[in-house]
Image (cartoon, helix red, strand yellow):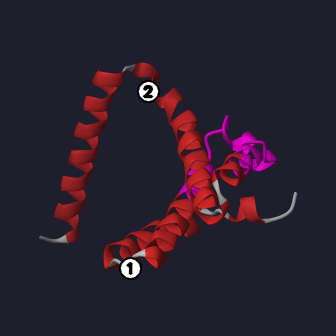
């Protein structure tokens, strides 16, 4: 199968998925993307911090992350910063889990999450205001 045929098949599959999602969820589905990404980001922050230093530290760090200016700002503006930070944290979580019990699939998934996070541009979260 060549690249053009694969591209056509992937586009057709994406269009079918989006049309089904649109029918099932409705026209307001796009408004749920940012809140769900925010919740996923905070859950990942909590999981990483709770495993490293305890549940109380995880809750405090999740609250501090939520009220961080850049995270709070991007929770209402559709940009690529929030998904890229979520992918970066997912990669960190997978690397941490892989350190506890090594499995090659976790390393592969961590790399698959870290690459797109760099492409999406998470640097905004790392620089001082």
Tag 1–tag 2 contact (CB < 8 Å): no
Q: Position of residue 30 (x, y in %)?
A: 48, 30
Residue 116 is a magenta residue: no
Q: Residue at x 67, y 34 (%)?
A: 76
Instruction: Give SS at disc 1.
Output: loop
Q: Quadrant of the N terminus?
A: bottom left
The answer to whether any part of residue 80 appears in the image is: no
Q: Residue at x 19, y 62 (%)?
A: 6
The answer to whether any part of residue 67 appears in the image is: yes
Q: Is residue 39 above or below residue 9?
A: above
Q: Residues within 10 Å of mark 1 (few under 14, many from 20)?
A: few
* Residue at numbered disc 1: 102
Q: Which residues are magenta?
A: 60-86
Q: Is residue 83 left or right of residue 4?
A: right
Q: Position of residue 26 (x, y in %)?
A: 37, 20
Q: Quadrant of the C terminus?
A: bottom right
Q: Position of residue 102 (x, y in %)?
A: 38, 79
Q: Residue at x 32, y 73 (%)?
A: 105
Question: Is label 1 or label 2 in front?
Answer: 1
- The part of the image, by quadrant, that contains residue 86 is bottom right
Instruction: Give SS at disc 2.
Output: helix
Residue 77 is a magenta residue: yes
Q: Which mark is residue 29?
A: 2
Q: Residues within 10 Å of mark 2 (few under 14, many from 20)?
A: few
Q: CA distance from mark 1 to mark 2?
A: 38 Å
Q: Residue at x 21, y 46 (%)?
A: 12
Task: Give the mark, 1 or 2, whose residue is nearer the N terminus.
Answer: 2
User: 51 or 4, which is in the foreground?
Assistant: 51
């Amino acid at each position: 199968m060549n690249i053009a045929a694969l591209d056509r098949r992937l586009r057709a599959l994406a269009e079918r998925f989006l049309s089904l999602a649109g029918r099932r969820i409705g026209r307001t589905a796009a408004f749920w993307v940012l809140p769900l990404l925010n919740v996923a980001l905070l859950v990942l922050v909590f999981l990483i911090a709770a495993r490293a230093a305890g549940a109380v530290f995880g809750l405090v760090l999740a609250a501090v992350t939520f009220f961080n200016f850049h995270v709070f700002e991007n929770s209402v503006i559709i940009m690529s910063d929030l998904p890229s930070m979520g992918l970066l944290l997912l990669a960190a979580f997978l690397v941490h889990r892989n350190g506890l019990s090594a499995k090659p699939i976790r390393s592969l998934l961590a790399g698959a999450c870290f690459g797109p996070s760099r492409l999406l541009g998470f640097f905004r979260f790392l620089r001082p205001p």
